[in-house]
Image: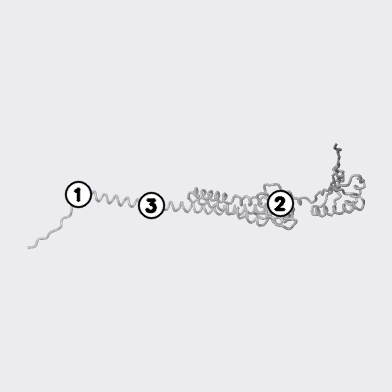
Amino acid sequence: MFLLQIPSIPIPTADTTKVSSFFEKLSHASNMGVQQFMEQMISGLIHGIIKILIAAIIFWIGRWLIKKIKYIVTNILERRHVEPSLKTFLLSLINITLMLILLVIIVSILGVNTSSFVALFASAGIAVGMALSGTLQNFAGGVMVLLFKPYKVGDYIEAQGQSGTVKEIQIFNTVLNTPDNKTIIVPNGGLSTGIINNYSKETRRRVDWVFGIAYGNNYDHAKDVLKRLLDSDERILKIPEYLIVLSSLGDSSVNITVRAWVPSSEYWNVFFSMNERVYKEFEKEGINIPFPQMDVHLFSTNEE
């Protein structure tokens, strides 16, 4: 005789009910967490796409504005006849500066903290400025010289204790060529802040001479000789008229001052040639040019 045993079905107890409830809550929380995560991810993705689109639009508008600014600056520089090398440098500097500003704006739109970028640029600028203070001063002086043009290539100037014809205007220096064919390089920093005598700025210059004649010579005769020499020189301008005056009675001579206007390019030629012509003509006319002299009187005393 066989007996069949049927396994008994467990009857739920309080413990099993708690475990089941825990897993149900865990499953529900898990489902809620995934759903919330997905919602946040989708929301963040949409927000990020919007930021990227706004940044792209700002970038496009910024590039357009930079091109317009460069176009306006180019026209201004061309109207002022700025040197091509300086114009290229200034346009590049403007482009780099504006692009850096645009980059900071775009990074800020994307949500990145820009304070570190600004601090980095500021510290780099201070370091470079301190290291290149003299060079930057000369560069700024070169920019001022090229923009305001106190002199140009070919002008004869005197500045910083040096004088000569301007051979070349560079960004940092000005190259002078002296009358005895020496090359002098003058930093632009001092030129932009110091006094510059530009002898070629005007189209005409006044030449001054002082001719001395001996006491006892006829002043009117000497004056007529000088008038004849001035009238015969075509390089001397008729307007303004030249001037001949007895300027002083010196220790050894009667001094006659002559002033005449000539083209700036003929200044030295007229000055030297007139000296030679006056000397020869005075000698021919019997007008004496004295040399400095001193009268010495000797007194003798009778001693007992």
User: At label 2, which amino acid type do we have?
Assistant: Gln
Front label number (1 vs 2): 2
From the viewer's perspective, tell me whether residue 146 is left or right of residue 256: left
Marks 1 and 2, the one that precedes in the sequence: 1
- Secondary structure at numbered mark 3: helix
The 10 Å Cα crowd at callout 1, few under 14, some 14 to 19, many 20 or more, is: few
Q: Residue furthest top?
A: 304
Residue matched to label 2? 162
Residue matched to label 1? 13
Quadrant occupied by the N terminus: bottom left
Residue 130 percent coordinates (x, y):
57, 49
Question: Is residue 56 or residue 189 the one in the foreground?
Answer: 189
User: At label 3, which amino acid type do we have?
Assistant: Phe
Question: Is residue 161 or residue 37 the one in the foreground?
Answer: 161
Residue 199 percent coordinates (x, y):
76, 50
Residue matched to label 3? 37
